[in-house]
Amino acid sequence: MFMNQLKGLQNSLVVIGSRFVSNSSTGRKNILAAAIAEESAPSHQWTKDEIQAIYETPLLNLIFAAQTQHRRYHDPSTVQLCTLMNIKTGGCTENCSYCSQSSNNDTGLKAEKLVSVEQVKEEALLAKKNGSTRFCLGAAWRGMEGRKSAMKNISKMIETVNDIGLESCVTLGMLDKSHSNILKDVGLSAYNCNIDTSREHYKDIVTSRTYDDRLRTIENVRESGINVCTGGILGLGEAQNDRIGFLYTLSNMSPHPESVPINRLVEVKGTKIVNDLKNNKNPKLTFEDILRTIATARIIMPTTMIRLAAGRFTMREYEQFICFMAGCNSIFTGKEMLTTPCNGWDEDKAMLARWGLQPLKPFATTLLQFLQ
């Protein structure tokens, strides 16, 4: 089936790429060439105009440049497999318009209590058995303020994941410095706090916490010495300028995030975003938009792990293949993505084997040795 899908790949890319061919300019070519030049180092001072110039490069050239950048910094034959477990489902007081777990959205999802350490151990062992090397724990609430008992239990969960031999990652909402220090002390590998979209579009998606609230949590995590995982969701009714603004925020973090998850919105019945999108005036998200975002991210954040996350199950195999050509080197795999479907381990391992890719070993890196 995959080979049949690939037969039309070149023609598809040419058709998609034609959108920007007539807009090619010497200035755009110079910016792209400088970004991938052998003597260049990762920059943390990108302008929106520079990012736009790269983003609007004719697609075939953009993908080639992204793959060139990827091979310059990473072992192109390895991919990290990550698994996400929902440790506290539903009942979140935040009003994120896209989230099925928000109490402000009428999705019929029932709030549940924090799972046990033993349940986490069972799921982490299953993930390791199936080849995942990072195990992520997600809790649906605003943040860790006033949650001393939960912090103790989550600390035990992190230690359990570490003892099993997996990288540990959690996403628990907002953290102050004392919270991030506790997580560091128990050996947390990475903390996820997505910025979701551009600063400008953010207010149309979430109002219960600010963009700067998210950035402060990321700063606290970084200062505590924990790896930062932060990305966003494509398909929130954003314009192209918002995808550029999203990349602008990420690429000007210093250092760059250790990993950037790219999610494709999964519309859940009962969430506010479903109705919002019906009245949205911006063009609907296309696969081309996803691909350009990934390729641009790879070029401007060359050392970062770029992770295909929620919504990957909606992509055909050849589309996932092109995403890896554009610089992705990590995926979420397993049972589910919090409350939405996820590609399974067996399916993913078979797919990667067809492509000649190997799962990354625990606590290893795709970065080439001279960069470590």
Image: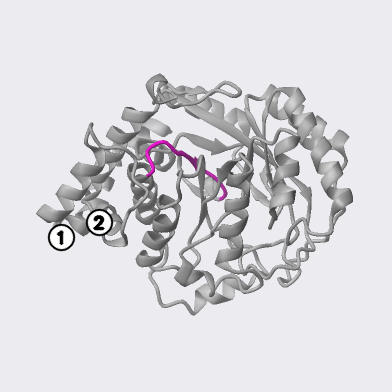
Quarter residue 77 falls in: top left
Q: Give the mark nearer the N terminus: 2 vs 1.
A: 1
The correct choice, above or below, for 177 with respect to 123 in the image is below
Q: Residue at x 50, y 65 (%)?
A: 236
Q: Residue at x 65, y 63 (%)?
A: 99
Q: Are marks 2 and 1 in contact (CB under 8 Å)?
A: yes
**Residue holding disc 2:** 56
Tell me the tag on residue 23. Answer: 1
Q: Position of residue 141 (x, y in %)?
A: 75, 59
Q: Position of residue 267 (x, y in %)?
A: 58, 62
**Pick the front one: 66 or 199:** 199
Q: Position of residue 261 (x, y in %)?
A: 52, 46
Disc 1 marks which amino acid? Asn
Q: Residue at x 82, y 47 (%)?
A: 151
Q: CA distance from mark 2 to mark 1?
A: 8 Å
Q: Tell me if residue 298 can be seen.
A: yes
Say whether residue 141 is left or right of residue 51. right
Say whether residue 363 is left or right of residue 234. right
For the record, the magenta segment spans 301-310
Find numbered disc 2 in the image and state the secondary structure of the residue it sits on: loop
**Pick the front one: 237 or 203:** 203
Q: Position of residue 28 (x, y in %)?
A: 17, 53
Q: Tell me if residue 193 can be seen.
A: no
**Pick the front one: 266 or 63:** 63
The correct choice, above or below, for 16 with respect to 366 in the image is below
